[in-house]
Amino acid sequence: MARTVLAGTLWPDVTEENALGSLRTALWRLHRGRRPVVESRGGVLALSDGVQVDVHSFTRAALLVLNRPEALGDEVPPVLLSCGELLLGWDEEWVLIERERLRQLRMHALESLSAVLAERGCHGLALEAALTCVALAPLRESAHRAVAAVHLAENNVVEAYRHYEIFRQLLFDELGVEPSQRFRSMLPPRRYG
């Protein structure tokens, strides 16, 4: 990013000269006694090659889960279970778009991770992944189906029904609709008598 653009973004309420001075001071402080985290090349600033960016680590982990779940091994990428929102409090359009892209990627990865873990018999971690997705999007049916699928994989039919009923009530209260036939058909038929 060009120095003038970055300075204007970080210090929008001062003159360009003062903003550039503040940027020089900030860069000097960043480099004091440490490996450089920012490099300057012809008036353009960029992160140094050795800097790890959490968004890049998250994206790699999410795409691994979606594209090659067999490569996961026994480790669950903790970044999928515990990451926060991108640049919380920033409301520029590019941030909002990127934040939503990452949110959607995370939810798809969590649902996929839940299915992979349930298949491997790691039901506790599978449930954690599914419930993390539910917390991100309480009205997202596919996340609730992932929770019910884990319960069914453990033969906890009562828990699957209980979760279905909680979601059914939430969906009806919020939107006045019922869960899909796909969700209903996941559950074994109830037998009375």
Image: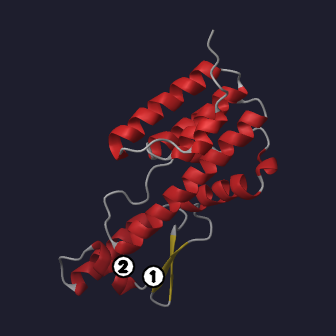
* Residue 53 shows in this picture: no
Q: Quadrant of the N terminus?
A: bottom left
Q: Along the horizontal axis of the image, is 47 left or right of 25?
A: right
Horizontal and vertical percent for residue 77? 65, 45
The three-letter amino acid code for the residue at tag 2 is Leu
Q: In the rendered structure, are the residues bearing label 1 and label 2 in contact, judged by CB atoms less than 8 Å apart?
A: yes
Horizontal and vertical percent for residue 157? 64, 22
Horizontal and vertical percent for residue 174? 34, 43
Name the residue that disc number 1 marks: 1
Query: 180 or 34: which is nearer to us?
Result: 180
Residue 27 quadrant: bottom left
SS class, disc 2:
helix
> Compared with residue 163, is residue 113 higher up or lower down, i.e. above or below?
below
Q: Earlier in the sequence, mark 1 or mark 2?
A: 1
Residue at far bottom of view: 42
Seen at 31% across and 66% down, the residue is: 91
SS class, disc 1:
loop
Horizontal and vertical percent for residue 164? 52, 31
Name the residue that disc number 2 marks: 6
Residue 105 quadrant: bottom right
The three-letter amino acid code for the residue at tag 1 is Met
Q: CA distance from mark 1 to mark 2?
A: 6 Å
Label 1 crowd bin: few (<14), some (14–19), many (20+), radius 10 Å: few
Q: Across the whole image, how many numbered discs are drawn on residues?
A: 2
